[in-house]
Image (cartoon, rainbow, N blue to C red):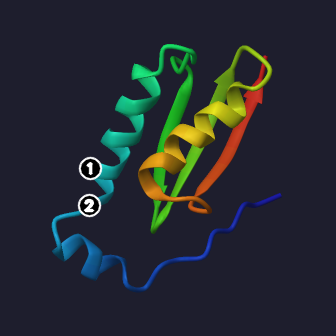
Amino acid sequence: MVLRLETWKEYESCCNEGHSSSATKASVESALRAAYDLDAGEITVVVLGRFVVLEGFVRRKGDEDRAAEIAEDIVGKGYVKSRLLRR
């Protein structure tokens, strides 16, 4: 199965306003690692257009939802795709 995400044609205009995919990635990564209730050591953040994709592993039940919630606080509800697995 291939995960296909829609692309955002207006993304370049967003970047012209000072927002970039690398800044978004850094913000999400920083927020995940700062969360006291989440072990984000095995979570990888990828930015595809206007979407943030969370990949990797979490240890506890509910951590997948918590990680997505943290990312949505930064990029907005509906713009986070979680591909996290629990070990």
In the rendered image, the vertical position of residue 83 relative to residue 81, given as above or below:
above
Q: Residue at x 57, y 18 (%)?
A: 38
User: From the viewer's perspective, is 16 left or right of 39?
Assistant: left
Quarter holding the C terminus is top right
Instruction: Bin the neighbour count of mark 2 within 10 Å (Cα to Cα): few under 14, some 14-19, many 20 and up.
Output: some
User: Residue 20, which numbered label?
Assistant: 2
Q: Residue furthest right?
A: 1
User: Residue 52, which numbered label?
Assistant: none
Quarter of the view holding residue 86: top right
Q: CA distance from mark 2 to mark 1?
A: 5 Å
In the rendered image, the vertical position of residue 66 relative to residue 14, given as above or below:
above
* Amino acid identity at mark 1: Ala
Q: In the image, residue 32 lies at what x, y percent?
A: 46, 29
Q: In the image, residue 83 lies at what x, y percent?
A: 70, 43
Q: Residue furthest bottom?
A: 9
Q: What element does badge 1 sit on?
A: helix
* Amino acid identity at mark 2: Ser
Quarter holding the N terminus is bottom right
Q: In the image, residue 81 lies at what x, y percent?
A: 64, 53
Q: What element does badge 2 sit on?
A: loop
Instruction: Bin the neighbour count of mark 1 within 10 Å (Cα to Cα): few under 14, some 14-19, many 20 and up.
Output: few
Q: In the image, residue 4 lies at what x, y percent?
A: 68, 68
In the rendered image, the vertical position of residue 18 relative to residue 43, given as above or below:
below
Which residue position holds label 1? Answer: 23
Q: Residue at x 45, y 68 (%)?
A: 49
Q: Quick check: marks 2 and 1 in contact, CB under 8 Å?
A: yes
